[in-house]
Amino acid sequence: MKIKKRFLKAVSALLCVVLLFSLSATVFAANSTVNFVLSSAVYSEERGTYVAQDTFKSGDILYLKLTATQINNLGGMSFRIGYDSAVFTFMNNKSVCLIEDSEPQYSYHTSEIRVIYENGYYNKETSVTGAIFYLAFGVNELSNSGTAAFTFEIDDLYDNSSAQKDIASNMTDSITVNLSAETISEETLALFKKLEAISYPDSKADIDAATDAFNKLTSSQKQLLKTTYPNEYNWLSTALTRYNRLAEEASYAQLMAEVNGFKETYADVLKLTEQTVSLANEQAVTQAKQAYDNTSAAAKTYLQSEGKLVNALSDRVDELKDIKAEVDDFINNEAYAHIWNRNIIENDYDINYTNYISFIQLAMLNYDLLSDEAKPLVQAEYEWLTKLNDEANKYLALDEAAAALAQKVAEFQKTYLYVFKLNDNSVEVSDRGAIQMVIDAYNSLDDQALKEALKPRITKLKAMLELLDDLDEEEEDSSSTGSSVTKTETVTKTETVTKTKTNRVTDTIIKTLGGGTALSNTILILFILLAVSVIILVVTYILCQQYKKKSAIADYDYDYEEV
């Protein structure tokens, strides 16, 4: 019982101490005289904060920073800011109030604004300190450099008790800022001075550069140019008119020189026709077309027939290049290139002609597909094919089976001519289906002799499929590598987001425990001390109870031993 009484006395004493501390803390929270200070700043987008600055020019946004020493339990305040309305424009939409709970009200007067703030909460423990307002002012256009002042005066300052007690404060403050009038750089003035004398066509770039520089000037800088640099302004204003006059007066002989120069330089090309031009003239025709395209619009009006001819010659050269490519593809086709060997007939052709029949037939089919202009260019090759074919037909006339087989081979190749014309250089992934279709058709043949005759060609087609498979594997490997990179990036991004969220939660906890006013912190510490003290007392009581029980048991054991 004694221990319980001592415990209750200790808890009562501790609560009294906490109460006394709380009362003293409340006394300490009373407001002393509040000091207000004005300063000027600008908002830095790069740093994301306000930066002190005392010199401003036209177009700047000046932030008037109002700083106060600590105000406890703020209920409301009203103050006036005086300024030169000819120099500054108050910007309500950009002004910032750093006091919570309510938005301030602004009222406008001649060269003055009044700001009224009311908390609206009675007996709410608050503490305001440091920067409490950033009032935004736009700097109007300046004609002269100088200074300007802002004044500050408190009309009312009271706490948030129901009585709305006044809070003492200093009554006035003011600051002076520097104003920098617009100037025009020497580099810009130099652009305008270059327009004193105009020439055609060399001054066009100078006029464009000066006009662009003038458009970038502020309105006050443009006014400064008119009043302070009248000559430069006049040269700029009249430059384009003077230039156009020179253009109209440009010498007809100069224009004719351009026209005649083109005709003389490309006289040989202009003698050609669509019938006489050849690939040997390709470079000269290309140069003539480029030169014509680069001539002035005025010169083109005098070169209409020449331009028409040059364009027609250029188109014809492109056609000749296509015909040459067609001929080269016919002659150099890998499928039958070996039959151009002129020694075939002398080398036992009568015995081996069946080995050449399918290739001769394929070349003949390819020849039939040539354009009318390409065929005359391969006349020698066609005559050679005809000779080989005639020789083969002599032997086929004596061998009905070979003739029938040759006919079957020809029909099969004709059916799939597009595929049989492919080679390793021309085959594409899109040809896979057509190639496979030919192989399937070949595999379904029942005629073993026909299959044997087509076997070399089919073997080559299968090799092409393997080539396409290799290309597919390379693309898949490249795609897999890309996917791995993407997955790694995704994991990294997920971890970053998770860490960011965790950091935000941690910050919130820290702010909750460490934030608040000086009074709130004091009370929080007192309650923590109280909780710790209570825990210590409870633990002490439990230990005492256990000790008491152990003592009673020990006494009982001792009495039992004596008995």
Image: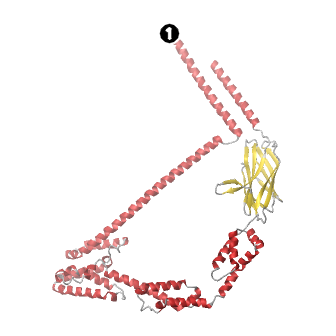
Mark 1, residue position? 560
In this rendering, is residue 521 above or below 427?
A: above
* Residue 517 on image: x %, y %: 70, 41
Q: Answer with left or right where residue 167 lies relative to residue 299.
A: right
Near-viewer residue (2 or 181) = 181
Classify residue 368 by image quadrant: bottom left
Which residue is found at the position 36% from the left and 66% from the top? 471
Quadrant of residue 235 within the rendered picture: bottom right
Q: Quadrant of residue 411?
A: bottom left
State the residue lying farthest toward the top.
563
Left or right: 331, with 49 as reference point: left
Which residue is at a point 70% across and 82% down the rendered structure image? 241
Instruction: Residue 45: give x, y in percent of width and height.
Output: 65, 57
- Crowd tier of the residue under label 1, counting other residues whose Cα lies within 10 Å: few below 14, some 14–19, many 20 or above: few
In this orientation, does residue 371 appear? yes
Residue 535 image point, x, y percent: 61, 29
99 and 548: which is toward the camera: 99
Q: Secondary structure at mark 1?
A: helix
Q: Give the vertical position of 311 relative to 133 (above or below).
A: below
Q: Please name the amino acid that badge 1 sits on.
A: Tyr
Marks counted in the figure total: 1
- Whether 264 is drawn above or below 110: the answer is below
Q: Residue at x 74, y 63 (%)?
A: 58
Q: Nearer the viewer, residue 117 or 67?
A: 67
| Placement of the N terminus among the 4 image quadrants | top right
Left or right for 408, reference 89: left
Residue 336 visible, this angle: no
Question: Position of 167 compared to 273: left or right?
Answer: right
Residue 120 position in % (x across, y down): 76, 47
